[in-house]
Image: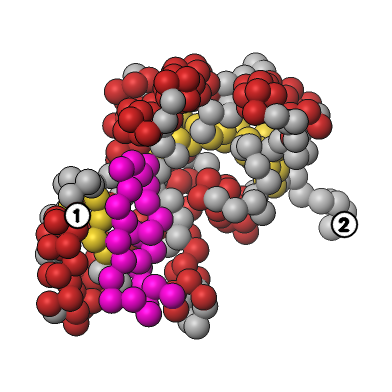
Amino acid sequence: MDPREKVMRPRVLILTSEPTDAPGGMEHAVRELETGLDRLGYAVAVLNRGNAAPRWVARPRNKWMGYVADAALSWFLGRKVRKLVGPDLIAVVSNGSFGWYLPRLPKSVRKVHFYHGTYRGQAEIIRPFVTFSGAFKLKWWDSMVLERQSGRGKLIVCNSDQTRQEVQEYFGYSGKTVWLPLSIFRHAGPETLPSLYNAADFAVCTSLYESFGYVVAEGLTCGVPVVASLGGACGALLRHTPLEHLLVADAHSCRDFEAAIRAVLGDRDLHRQIVVRLIRPEIEKKMEPENWLRRFREVTSL
């Protein structure tokens, strides 16, 4: 064989909404998946509204056009997939509410859907704070139609046990938790984010709803005690540990948050030692980028 001839690499297509250089937790996870698979020798292409959809979908003119564009995006992504099907294609990975349409694919191609939370779970919590129409759209159109259809007939992976339970309860799909990668592991030196976290005695996450909760995972990774409401990865990271008392069951209770914060301030050094010695190593096993990618590949058989 001519050494100049390129060896065909197995291809993976990732379907998402925004380009991977956009800010956001979902984009961060897609970026880590793309670069990680590329390092392992896969040919990875990320299809999004910027490179696979017409202008009116990529940049809708108003809110109502945006609603239509979000629904139409999956169709344009699927149409692009149809053009890229070939013998070297081994997997198509979609996420969120973007992936309800795929062309007929060879049986050898794995179809994976990555849930980063559910809009229905979010809508149930925030209903008192949004309009009826907004909650209705989140709960029924975005979640029970688009999100549910996007995962139909695919291997399901989730960013937390909470998301996995919501997907099972609302959509009837069984999945596995792969968590999310934390790139902060690669920046343990004098980088901005670790420096900001370490300048604090503690961090607080008071969210009413979290499918994952980067603040909790990042703060603990930097060795900072985190006082957090229940939800997302919070319970998985703090429950059944010596810092379980930092979990606040009632996110509306200022008194409970104050009590947890006073406990941290009462012995700062002890709380930091527990985080560094007991909790950070467990997070690293799940969310350090290389470990996370290994878990993702094991679950999806890539």
Q: Is residue 207 magenta?
A: yes
The amino acid pointed to by label 2 is Arg
Q: CA distance from mark 1 to mark 2?
A: 66 Å
Instruction: From the viewer's perspective, tell me whether residue 119 is left or right of residue 105.
Output: left
Write the residue at 31% across / 56% down: 205
Along the viewing direction, whichever of 300 and 236 lies nearer the viewer:
236
Q: Is residue 93 above or below residue 263?
A: above
Residue placed most toward the observer, 86 or 230: 230
Using a 10 Å C-alpha cutoff, classify the residue at mark 1 as few (fewer than 14 neighbours), some (14 to 19) or many (20 or more): few
Tell me what residue is drawn at x 64 percent, y 51 percent.
22
Residue receiving disc 1: 254
Q: Secondary structure at mark 2?
A: loop
Q: Please state which of residues 242 and 41 is positioned toward the viewer in this rendering.
A: 242
- Chain part drawn in magenta: 196-223
Given this view, does label 1 or label 2 mark the residue nearer the observer?
A: 1
At 81% across and 51% down in the image, what residue appears?
Answer: 6
Badges 1 and 2: C-beta atoms under 8 Å apart?
A: no
Residue 177 is labelled as none
Q: Considering only order in the chain, which callout, 2 or 1, is on the residue closer to the N terminus? A: 2
Measured as percent of width and height from the top left, residue 52 is found at 76, 33
**Residue hosting label 2:** 4
The residue sitting at 46% across, 55% down in the picture is: 181
In percent of width and height, residue 28 lies at 55, 53
The answer to whether 82 appears left or right of 158 in the picture is: right
Give the image quarter of residue 219. bottom left
Amino acid bearing label 1: Cys
Residue 24 in view? yes
Res 10 visible: no
Check disc 2: other Cα within 10 Å, few if <14, some if 14-19, many if 20+: few
